[in-house]
Amino acid sequence: MQTHEIIRRFTDHFTSAGHTRVPSASLILDDPTLLFVNAGMVQFKPYFLGDAPAPYPRATSIQKCVRTGDIDEVGRTTRHNTFFQMAGNFSFGDYFKAGAIEHAWELVTGSSGYGIDPERLWATVYRNDDEAFDLWRRHLPESRIQRRGGKDNYWDMGVPGPGGPCSEIYFDRGPAHGRDGGPEADEDRYLEIWNLVFMQDVRGELSPKDEHPPIGTLPKKNIDTGMGVERVATLLQDVENVYETDLVRPVIARAEEFSGRRYGASVQDDVRFRVIADHARSGVMIIGDGVTPSNEGRGYVLRRLLRRIVRSARLLGVQEPVLNSFAEVVRDAMAPSYPELRNDFERIAAVIRNEEEAFLQTLTAGSRIFDTAAATVRESGRTQLPGDQAFKLHDTFGFPIDLTLEMASEAGLTVDEQGFRTLMAEQRDRAKADAKAHKAGHSDGTAYRAVLDAAGGTEFLGYTDLAGESRVVGLIVDGVGVPAAGAGTAVEVVLDRTPFYAEGGGQQADTGWIRGDGFTVEVGDVQSPVTGLVVHRGTVTDGEITIDAPVHAEVDVTRRQAVSRAHSATHLVHAGMRRALGDSAAQAGSLNAPGRLRFDFTSPAGAVPASVLADVEDEINDVLTGDHEVRAFVTTQDEARRIGAMALFGEKYGDSVRVVEIGDYSRELCGGTHVHRSGQLGLVKLLSEASIGAGVRRVEALVGLDAFRFLAKEHVLVSQLAEQFKAKPEELPERIGGVVERLRIAERELEKVRAGAVLSSAGALADEAEDIGGTALVAAAVPDGIGGNDLRALASDVRGRLGARPGVVALFSTDAGKLSFVVATTSSARDAGLAAGTLVPSFAAAVGGRGGGKPDLAQGGGTDPSGVPAAI
Ligand code: SER
């Protein structure tokens, strides 16, 4: 059964059982606790926690998932995958254990489902979950139901949040695959295909799960299940592992074509084939959801994935660029489920191409470093490349150790792997410590959650109101809920309703004041650390703020308006860029600050020509003068898509989305605040456009008065220049160009004159030769600024004038702070054993320098011009 059919049957099974079909969320969800979405339940987290009401009692989805904890293991085993699809059914306070088990059993064994022989199935339950055990007894003998501990049969997200005991379904692949004894004995023979989680707990402290009981219960009992689509495909297609299933194998086939080698012929090559197949899938899917390669976070994971593909292909003997070809295979395999891969492929391919080109350059540069290091090792008569060199290649050039090992072996060397691993471990420890420190800064959210549970979420008034009356429902100091906070305290204030906008979607937070009877809090930052809750961070400037106090919350209007102008301008820039460059100019990030903005976007074609920028700017300002209405409305994701709103769909939780329209010019999903009419922006001035990473560009712009002031300042500057150069502004470029050119010519002339003067001093220098035991010595500091060539010419000239006597000339000169020297000897001096090259060390130390050369002429440089007299 093909993978797409497995997916279809899953979806049909659950939709006919009353589940709402929900599309896969983006791999990049707005959840700071996760790098990538790694389970089907992630997009439903607020419904489980009760932060938001579930719009449906039952749902089903096929979720794209990325788990990158063990990239290095991929390929070495056949179990690790960074990309997979999780088919799930979810109940939000609707059915519970019995429903979940019955639904799963029917699909797995039923003839319109997967028709798996019940005799091959096993189940596991959490150690004391008698209820689940008894439910399984209806289908399975007791001997095929195992009880397991929290490590295997309790599931949570790995971060504080919802969790619960779970029950897993296993398929027995038969004695050829391992030992008897069920999943408890051998998880290779008994393959887990489905995890049914009975979501009922709130997890605070994490693992080990058995020792840390949950800190609370969820408002309702829920179901979250996850079936491994690729694993089921492995079984139903009767192949050895996921790499051989219908959607993965074609990538390997392409790699076979490229390399001329065969999958299955060598253990080592097979690892490489599998790395390519796995990483190509995750790489394409991650880029599809808007990530671009970079050196941190998600971008770094992506970079590693792509580079490992290129590297693996090299190890298979392929030299030419390969990534795009693999990406095409992935697109064709996955597009039936994810049509956006086809529509967006131009952009995906461009990101990939840029990264591959950059990495191939890195390979070239790193290879040079490697060659130098190898040469040094050989010269010193050793045969082992030190661990720190291997580490440097890894750290600075992204060389995986196997690359270094292979290059070393080609060069007849070994590598101090132990030393390398020690350095790697040290680096990992540092990274872990950093991560821990980072987590500590973001408190575990318990205090926020407590406020949310007690008081419900915060109502946001700020789309329409900039001030309003509300009530204090939570006060947090140093991560702990408090009843009151006095003057001077740094406090986090939660109100039942607020006009303050919490930082999000690239828009900076509002600032302002919360005032009550006898107290004021100055608000400097506003965040939403838990969905639905707005937290005002500030300082109590006088009096004492208390829980329940009525307050007047007031946003700093000037700042908010300037930020809103910037945000509306960002939408216009985005729309303008798309119109000018096509849909591949997708937003990759943005910042909306008072009066200024930054807009990052993908640009496969590289730099945007100045003329295009000028046109975009012109068009945007035309939209401003049109004074179009800015409208915001809430609609469904489907409708937003239909009317062509720009967004990375699936980025936000839930089905309803807010759309912001500026006339007919721009239509975009957005939760931010905006002006009412485009005319309020006044003026938008694009300042710069530059690269900020492979295939990603950034434009910066000023808006409103800030744009006007910038232009006014430039105008004054131009007027001053015009005055100074006695030219009209439009003549300035030519005039200044002319002046610069004349200056250059004059400088060259001056240089010649100076050199002539210096050279003409040769006679005088020769005349001053000192006689030292029959050898003429001219040792002198010549005027500064005589460069290497001139200094050599002068030394030769002086030497020529010494005639046939034994003579030594040593001249010193400082040029741009750097000391140079030249030593020249006459042939009779050389006959007497005075070689220029060996004279240099006798004085080099005095000027902090070094150098050398031939017997007749040597030169060098120094760092300490004050040592010249001593050297002489
Ligand atoms: N959340 C569970 C898992 O990831 C079941 O979907 O295994």
Image (spheres, helix red, strand yellow):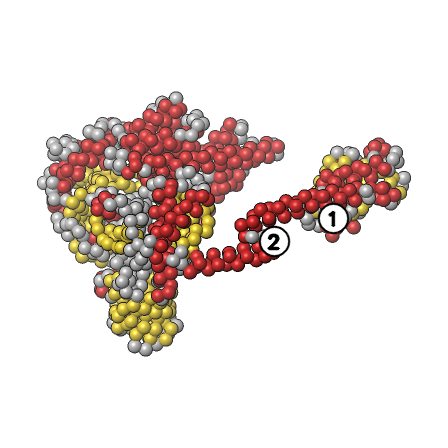
Residue matched to label 1: 784
Callout 2 touching callout 1 (CB < 8 Å):
no
Nearest the eye: 126 or 310: 310
Give the image quarter of residue 836.
top right
Give the image quarter of residue 318.
top left
Tell me which residue sits at (14%, 41%) in the image: 15
Number of numbered discs: 2
Which residue type does callout 1 highlight? Asp
Figure check: 383 above or below 784 = above
Label 2 CA crowd tier, 10 Å (few <14, some 14–19, many 20+): some
Tell me which residue sits at (50%, 59%) in the image: 713
Q: Residue 147: x, y in percent?
A: 19, 44
Taking the image as drawn, is residue 243 in sight?
no
Q: Is residue 726 left or right of residue 498?
A: right
Residue matched to label 2: 725
Tell me which residue sits at (81%, 40%) in the image: 809
Q: How far apart are the alpha carbons under marks 2 and 1?
A: 33 Å
Q: Is mark 1 within 8 Å of ligand 1?
A: no
Q: Residue 711: x, y in percent?
A: 47, 56
Q: Secondary structure at mark 1?
A: loop
Figure check: 318 above or below 102 = above
Label 1 CA crowd tier, 10 Å (few <14, some 14–19, many 20+): some
Image mark for residue 804: none
Figure check: 305 above or below 654 = above
Tell me which residue sits at (25%, 27%) in the image: 239
Kindly give the residue lying farthest to the bottom in the view shown: 518
* Mark before the other along the chain sequence, 2 or 1: 2
Q: Residue 115: x, y in percent?
A: 14, 31
Taking the image as drawn, is residue 701 in sight?
yes
Q: Is residue 649 left or right of residue 799?
A: left
